[in-house]
Image: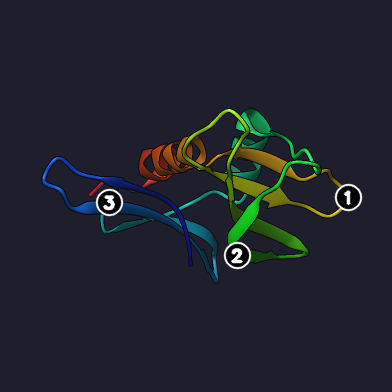
């Protein structure tokens, strides 16, 4: 399980978003609900919002989730020269491709949306 985003609700409670690897593939956990993700969801989101990772930029790895098949999702923190507060990013590593990096909040929002949109109706 990898925490990819955390915000504070209007009531002051933390709201977290996690990615988990299950037997059937990936799932996203948000607001206490778990949503299965399509096999291509993470790849599509990272292709849409990600950009190549600049190897010269200093990053601090917070946590890593092994996705199998040599793929990994890393939660990293970066403090740009012009920033006051470090920002959280996700780096998607796929064998044979350049690592892709995107703002963690953006990826979390997109994955939660896809998970909810494809969830079976009650």
The residue sitting at the right extreme is: 96
Between discs 2 and 1, the one toward the N terminus = 2
Query: Are the two marked residues, 2 and 1, in contact with CB atoms closer than 8 angstroms?
Result: no
Q: Work out how far the residue at label 2 is from the one at label 1, CA to CA, in angstroms.
A: 18 Å
Q: Which residue is mark 3?
A: 15
* Crowd around label 3: few <14 · some 14–19 · many ≥20 (10 Å): few
Q: Is residue 49 left or right of residue 52?
A: left
Q: Is residue 122 left or right of residue 1?
A: left
Picture quadrant where residue 33 is located: bottom left
Q: Secondary structure at mark 2?
A: strand
Distance, label 3 to label 2, CA atoms, is 20 Å
Q: Which residue is mark 1?
A: 96
Counting residues from the start of the chain, the first of labels 3 and 1 encountered is: 3
Q: What number is the disc on residue 65?
A: 2
Above or below residue 55? Residue 74 is: below
Label of residue 74 in the image: none
Q: Is residue 30 visible from the viewing direction of this image?
A: no
Q: Residue at x 22, y 50 (%)?
A: 122
| Residue at the limit of the structure toward the left, as seen here | 11
The image shows a total of numbered marks equal to 3
Q: How is the image coloured?
A: rainbow
Q: x and y percent of residue 121 in the render?
A: 27, 45
* Secondary structure of residue under mark 1: loop
Residue 60 pos. (x, y %):
63, 55
Q: CB under 8 Å between callouts 3 and 1?
A: no
**Compared to 51, does 36 lie above or below?**
below
Residue 61 visible at all: yes
Could you say which is closer to the camera, residue 6 or residue 26? 6
Badge 1 crowding class, 10 Å Cα cut-off, few under 14, some 14 to 19, many 20 or more, is few
Residue at disc 3, secondary structure: strand
């Amino acid at each position: 399980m990898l925490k990819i985003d955390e915000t504070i609700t209007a009531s002051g409670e933390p709201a977290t978003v996690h990615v988990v690897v299950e037997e059937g593939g990936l799932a996203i956990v948000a607001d206490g609900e778990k949503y299965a993700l399509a096999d291509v969801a993470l790849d599509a989101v990272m292709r849409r919002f990600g950009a190549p990772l600049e190897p010269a930029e200093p990053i601090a790895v917070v946590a890593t989730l092994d996705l199998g098949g040599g793929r990994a999702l890393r939660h990293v923190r970066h403090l740009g020269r012009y920033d006051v507060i470090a920002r959280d990013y996700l780096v998607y590593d796929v064998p044979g491709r350049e690592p892709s990096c995107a703002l963690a909040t953006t990826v979390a929002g997109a994955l939660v949306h896809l998970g909810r949109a494809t969830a079976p109706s009650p």
